[in-house]
Amino acid sequence: MKYNKQIALEGLLLKAFSPLPYEKAQRLMGPLSKKAMRVLPLKSLNCEKRRITRPDGSSFRVCVMRGKQSKGKTVGVLWLHGGGYALGAPEMAVMSFPRQLINHCNCVVIAPDYTLSTEKPFPAALEDAYTALLWLTENREALGIEAEKLVVGGESAGGGLTAALCLYARDRGFDRIGFQMPLYPMLDDRVTDTSADNRAPVWNTKANKAAWRIYLGDRVMNNGVSPYAAPARATDYAALPPAITVIGTVEPFYRETLTYFENLKRAGVPTALKEYEGAYHAFDMLAPYAAVSRDANRFLLEQYGAFTEQYIL
């Protein structure tokens, strides 16, 4: 497996010390990661924290981050963090693509602290994401969002949750998503040719299997798994929002991402995808100063701007 030379050293170090291939480690790290990431400094993202109420009366945290640009209408973005569904917190936005949006675009980014699978399995995370989507829609004017249509995006598991949410919203008649940005998304609990024996840094076959077991339990790889849990299982891609992504060629999600985007295109859904040879999972977050990561961010910002002009404004 040949890694992109620009990010190879970081990848090898991450591979040597990562505990993620072990299910017990993910279960332990889930709640700890949420607590640890709450202290990440978000002043540069113009962030304030609020709470959203679920239908059952309980609530969860949400980070509201405001873009620094003022040109054009303000766009609302729902961003779902990564972490294999088992780990992570909305404060990860400080090192993921929302940072680019805040610095370069006129937007309000909403990042919910959705329920991790280490707390409750599927469908808890999806239900929280949909609650956040409705909250964003209902509070659009109060948040200073001018555009009527919204963007939904996320990285890794957040990318998978993005695709699932677009399916779920479409099937409920919600038509306010202008386009989606599922970045290197976690879409398929089944084995593909790039997730079968993957030993890449950051996320590989062992980590992937462990995360899906936590998210789906005994249902994993069964025929009855819902496409709202694993969007690669969807059979109807019609009327889904246009989609943008980047993907590395050595990561486990490479094949499922290409297949998802091919299915969208066959259904007549506009897409923009760029591959990065030798790039491993979340390369843009973990090696942000590498030329390959800067190129990925440029591509995503360019496509975000073009899709915003065409499908939002």
Image (cartoon, grey):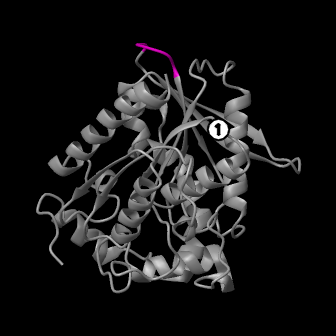
Which quarter of the picture shows residue 263?
bottom left
Q: Nearer the viewer, residue 131 or 53?
A: 131
Find residue 167 and report its horizontal and vertical position in percent: 61, 54
Q: Nearer the viewer, residue 83 or 146?
A: 146
- Label 1 sits on residue: 175
Q: Using the rendered image of the protein, determine whether residue 227 is visible from the camera's viewpoint.
A: yes
Horizontal arrangement in the rendering, residue 112 relative to residue 26 (left or right): right
313 vs 112, nearest the viewer:
313
Q: Where is 230 relative to 37, above or below? A: below
Residue appearing at x 61%, y 67% in the figure: 227
Horizontal arrangement in the rendering, residue 252 relative to residue 290 (left or right): right
- Identify the image quadrant of the N terminus: bottom left
Tell me: 149 left or right of 102.
right
Q: Is residue 22 magenta?
A: no
Residue at x 31% of width, y 58% of height: 247
Q: Position of residue 4 (x, y in %)?
A: 15, 63
Question: x and y percent of residue 285 in the render?
Answer: 34, 52
Q: Main secondary structure of the magenta part?
A: loop
Residue in view at x 55 percent, y 47 percent: 90
Examine the rendered structure and indicate whether residue 33 appears above or below residue 210: above
Q: Is residue 49 above or below residue 14?
A: above
Q: Residues within 10 Å of mark 1 (few under 14, many from 20)?
A: some
Give the quarter of the image for residue 309. Answer: top left
Q: Which segment is the magenta one?
A: 70-74
Going 74% across and 29% down the picture, which residue do you hit?
A: 138
